[in-house]
Amino acid sequence: MQLSFLAPLFDRGGPWATVYFDPAQNDESGAKRRELSVREACRTLEEAGADAATVQAVREALTDIGPAEDPAGRVVFAAGGNVVLSHRLSRPPQGQIACWAALPRLTPLLELSSQDPDCLVAYIDRTGADFELCGAAGPQDAGRTEGQQWPVHRTASVDWSERHFQLKVENTWEHNAGEIAEALGTAYEESGADLVVLVGDPRERPAVRDRLPEALRTVTVETEHGGRAAGSSSSALEEAIEQARQQYTRRRVDAALDRFSAGRVGTDRQTDAVEGVPAVIEAAREHRMDTLLVRPGGPDLARETWIGAEPDQVAVRRTDVQTLGEGDPISVRADDALLRSAAATASDVLIVPSPDEDGSDGSDIPVGGLGALLRWTYEPSQT
């Protein structure tokens, strides 16, 4: 998961109000529960020391959240009397989360937004394609392309001239497949999507896929459900897209954990991965963190860490932050500090399952719940 969408949270200082809010059911009793939940969240913030203007901004934002628009709820981040960011959740929180702290509370967002990748769906027929990006913000138009419009239909005749015409039809299909593949490659790069799903004409889909660059072909899947024509979407298509996203995420997590297990300190080669708060913070401070691995519920997530105004001013000890140029360090949770660093340095973030979730013995997950894959290997220091 890339955290670039959280940039507004780190363009200004805190402290921050963070509320994960479930709007409940869309009925009279649900409305009453929402009202009570808003009051409870605001009371929690007030008791934690939040200023009146920020509490009021949160109250207004929470009041506007309803089950029709946001069935799973939203998270609201506010500071200085303003709501800086409100983000839709994929799953409702198990109990309301409201806190007032020096940094935004981010780990629940990783869990409740899931790790579903951004998916570029290409709705293909023999004349062109429409592109749609399916991501955390919902479906968004990602462009379209049109190829040659004639000839595209075969005839049933076996006459020589008709066979010649049919050859022209097939040439048109081939030409359009190439144009669609080229446009799809451009849309993929511009959209920042993680994978591609090809939907539509059963002959044109594989023809388009065969013309994609190899790197793009490896993250492209096809489905027989749906098509380019209006009204052709279906629940089967939605399920196929969701399955493709889940499979992509599963492969990605498995690959990351394999790399983590092989690259830990203690092997007989250069280190490619680290675990534990001191080592991960050191990697974050030196901008070596390629992927931050987070296991929710791990004991290290809440470990005290010290930060300064800049994302790379982070250390286990207060005095270490002072040596980095920060005169007044602030105490925060380790996971919040590391997620701030990950967002600032364009590091990826992966939620990894606990052993009881995936049936493993836990040997391939970070001890304490925090680990990192590194951007380059290094010789571990001898201590």
Image (tube, rainbow, N blue to C red):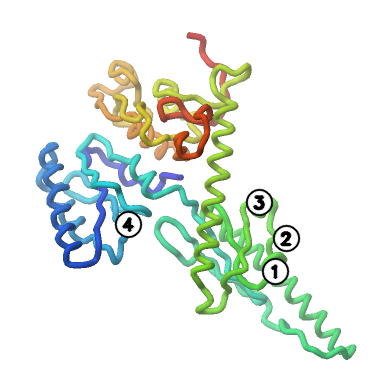
Q: Secondary structure at mark 4?
A: loop
> First in sequence: mark 4 or mark 3?
4
Task: Please name the amino acid that badge 4 sits on.
Answer: Ala
User: What whole-number distance in Å separates the C-alpha atoms at marks 3 and 2?
Assistant: 11 Å
Q: Please indicate whether residue 50 sits to the left or right of residue 10 in the image.
A: left
Residue 25's place in the image compared with 361, above or below, is below
> First in sequence: mark 4 or mark 1?
4
Q: Secondary structure at mark 2?
A: helix
For mark 2, does the 10 Å Cα neighbourhood hold few (<14), some (14 to 19), or many (20 or more) residues?
Answer: some
Q: Give the residue number, with chain letter if any, for mark 3.
A: 218
Marks 2 and 1 close (CB-CB < 8 Å) = yes
Q: Give the residue number, with chain letter if any, for mark 2.
A: 210
Residue 178's place in the image compared with 309, above or below, is below
At a point 46% along the width and 45% down the height, the residue shown is 1
Q: For residue 77, say whether it is visible.
A: no
Q: For residue 73, say whether it is visible.
A: yes
